[in-house]
Image (cartoon, rainbow, N blue to C red):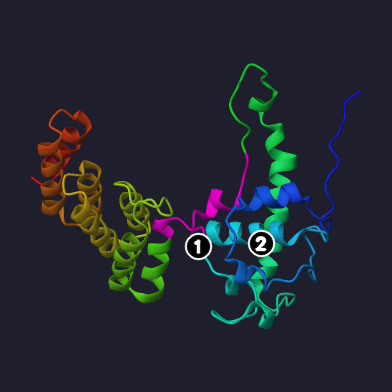
Amino acid sequence: MVRTRRRRRPGRRLSLGAALLAAVASPLFPASTLRAQIPSKFENLKVLPKDISRDSLVSVMRGFALGLGVRCQFCHVGKEGQPFSKWNFKSDDKAAKRKARFMLRMVDYLNRERLPTLPARADASREDPPVTVTCRTCHRGIPVPRPLGDVLELAARRSGLDSAVAVYGDLRRRYYGSGSYDFGERTLVELADRLVDSKRIPEAVRFLQLNLEQYPESVPTYVALSRAHEAAGDRSAAVAALEKATSLRPDDRRIRSELERLRKEGT
């Protein structure tokens, strides 16, 4: 007889273990003077277990804070530096708190219902550790888990190209090396390709020039720059970009072939 997995009802509470896993709970607690301000009983718990201990709840909350790179007031009603006894922790006024409940249930569903069905789980010969999803899996220490290319494209749409370039510099200074954003060689190349496809050529060229400031010998960047210049009708600039790419990678037949095509079409 085939056994079916019973689905969790949307309003059902998580087990303590599931809550700790979702948040990648930190074993570190606030100083004892701060912990003393936190009540031993909690109100308005709709996802976490009602009987959760103070230490466990603080651990889960710190896991959220570390996973998203935020402070308590991101979800809760209170002010930085204000005693916790003055905070309105039971309030649902902030949308972030309501979203957090949804995300907790989503992570629990993935770990309990979906990931166990991965084919690798059924392969007894594999010794890989189980795959699990946590807040940090997607958030990586930032509140909104949006890829860098999407962040920059959105900034360009909302505030202009110069603003988007400034955003890149700010994010690079703050997050480079943290894993929160991908500052690798191809991120801005992929963004530029999308912009060229959308006929946003000046933006594509500017982001590629920005990429060359970080990766001055990036062949993919010069190839993408050639494509952008060709799309703009500037064949000489397109040829110059491919000539630079060829000088950096002289054995690449695909690039040389594309360069020959551009030269022939320009004669």
Q: Residue at (29%, 69%) from the top-left corner?
A: 166
**Quadrant containing the C terminus in the rendered view:** top left
The picture places residue 89, in percent across and down from the top left corner, at 70, 75
Q: Tag 1's secondary structure?
A: loop
In which quarter of the view is residue 103 placed? bottom right
Asked if the residue under mark 2 is in contact with the one under mark 1, i.e. CB atoms within 8 Å, the reply is no
Q: Can I make out residue 210 in this image?
A: yes
Q: Tag 2's secondary structure?
A: helix
Question: Which region shows up in magenta?
Answer: 132-150
- The span from disc 1 to disc 2 (Cα, nearest Å) is 16 Å
Q: Is residue 166 left or right of residue 262?
A: right
Residue 58: mark in rendering: 2
Q: Which residue is mark 1?
A: 69
Q: Residue at (40%, 52%) from the top-left corner?
A: 178
The picture places residue 57, in percent across and down from the top left corner, at 70, 60
Q: Amino acid at mark 1?
A: Gly
Residue 172: mark in rendering: none
Residue lying furthest right = 1
Which is nearer the eye, 203 or 262?
203
Q: Residue at (59%, 75%) from the top-left corner?
A: 73
Of mark 1 and mark 2, the one earlier in the sequence is 2
Residue 69 sits inside the magenta stretch: no
Q: Amino acid at mark 2?
A: Val
The picture places residue 127, in percent across and down from the top left corner, at 60, 22
Q: Is residue 205 left or right of residue 100?
A: left
